[in-house]
Image: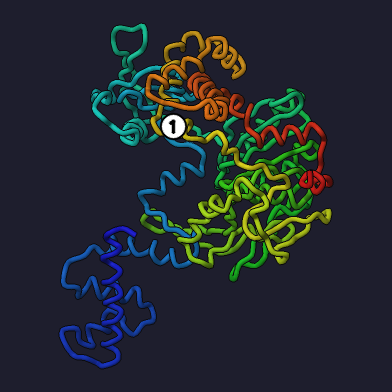
Amino acid sequence: MNKSTKIILPLLLGAAIAIGILIGTKIQGNINRANIESVGLFQPDKLSIITRLIEKDYVDTINKNELIENVIPVILDELDPHSSYIPASEMQDVTEEMRGNFSGIGVQFVMQSDTVVVVDVISGGPSNKLGILAGDRIIQVNKSTVSGIGLKSDSIVSLLRGKKGTTVDVSIERNGFDKLIDYTIERGEIPLFSVDVSYVVKENIGLVKVNRFAETTHKEFVAAISDLSSKGISKLIVDLRGNSGGYLQAVFNMVDEFLPANKMIVYTEGKSRPRYEYRSTDKGIWKDGDVAVLIDEFSASASEIFAGAIQDNDRGLIIGRRSFGKGLVQEQIPFMDGSALRLTVARFYTPSGRSIQKSYKEGNEAYRMDLFNRMRNEEMVNQDSIHLPDSLKYYTSAGRLVFGGGGIMPDFFVPADTLAFNNFYSEIIAKNLLYPFAFKFADQQRSTLNKMDEATQIESYLIEQKVFNQFISHIRKAGIKYSAKEYDESSKLLEKQLYALIARNIIGDKGYYPILFEIDNTVLKAIQLLEKNWSYKEVAQINKK
């Protein structure tokens, strides 16, 4: 609760008490009966009455609109954790996220040594068309210096983004050039990609990692599967870990690619909303191939609808850890000023009847602490720490036992790998030694690395150059001390992260994830199960082993 809200709430409460006294005792004074009736005191809408009384008779001048803007979130916080108010100032960012694009110049950058360094240029975007390159330094924007003056990333973003069709002047410093290179860039629509990466992870197994559900997600997803199919895959891993949800039509369309006709995907129901079922069509492009879905504690909402539909229809394996548990349906009601209310009107239920939503009876603060409590109770590392009552038992279409109670329980539990996160690793991360080293190496070797377009090529080169040994020497000089045991526990993770970060600086996420996933236990488990042709019928046996 911010400071202004803390001031306003007592004012509202005081006004309400004063109104009660006025009604009960018919006190005469400066606020007489005529004044009271003029603000509608005898109407049932107390909130409107209070705000009008404050505006009309309060001792100081107040901004009524600001008062209302501050109070609305407080009211909604009394309902459930996901009803929310979106101010007009934030609606553009929300709309862009859901629509899957924004207007800008089409670069990704980092602040390195107080300088804007381009790390990726979006293919087909305005900067790409003009020849701006990864590794370029943006020194000036609209003739004003942005390098070496302590600007934050948000300030740079606000300078570079703008309406489609408008222009921005940038001056670039590039290795090999003595003078700055000037560009006038016309801003255009820049896609926000939902599919981080899709690649053949092993022989006939493909992997698609989806980071959000937006308007463009289904189109991207189908394109990724079609490309992988052309490379001969017959089994698919869909990675929804960390995916917090988004546009519901996208998830309905995606699930539809996996199910035969007329299978239930999800249904919704609420006090004022009758049951409504979403069912599959017969258009799916992956109705027969094996599928494994990866989830974790940060997979929420649309991700849980996807996993629940696959699981309850016995279509594939769910692997990982219990998902977040967000299964409330929000309806967005726009206001004239550009703001909007997202009001919870129903709940999502999986085909077997499970409510995805976890309990919020203990209040929103306890709800927000749920993930922390799950970690404290060791749920992330020990499946036996999850205790679900028999009342939460449900059965899939084939009669297989699944559990409700909030979130989707995986068919196969994979604990979080916490062994590598020792003091040695934590100190390296806390002192921010990993990324700057990776960026510096990539920047210095860019002319060589730019000739490589596959993660395996880059990783082989880095191993050959003994880059990890260089990094260990670097952290020793920085004063990092460690035992042989700590090194054994963390070195493999650090090495893969280093190579992955260098590759990302050269070819983006298609270099990052394939390297990192080489030691990802959840991905490795999915590969193992798909290679052995495990099916839902054998899940019980899998979990016993």
Q: Position of residue 137 (x, y in %)?
A: 35, 19
Q: Indicate the secondary structure of the residue bearing disc 1.
A: helix
Say which of 363 and 88 sits in front.
Answer: 363
**Left or right relative to 253: residue 157:** left
Mark 1 residue crowding within 10 angstroms, few (<14) / some (14–19) / many (20+)? some
Answer above or below: position of 273 versus 133.
below
Q: Position of residue 242 (x, y in %)?
A: 56, 42
Residue drawn 31% across and 58% down? Answer: 2
**Left or right relative to 88: residue 379:** right
Residue drawn 72% across and 41% down? Answer: 257
- Give the residue number, with chain letter if any, for mark 1: 429
Tell me the quarter of the picture where residue 224 sits.
top right
Q: Position of residue 188 (x, y in %)?
A: 43, 30
Quarter holding the C terminus is top right
Answer above or below: position of 487 versus 154.
above
Answer above or below: position of 176 versus 512.
above
Q: Can I make out residue 442 in this image? A: no
Residue drawn 38% across and 26% down? Answer: 186
Q: Position of residue 166 (x, y in %)?
A: 35, 31
Say which of 116 and 385 sits in front.
Answer: 385
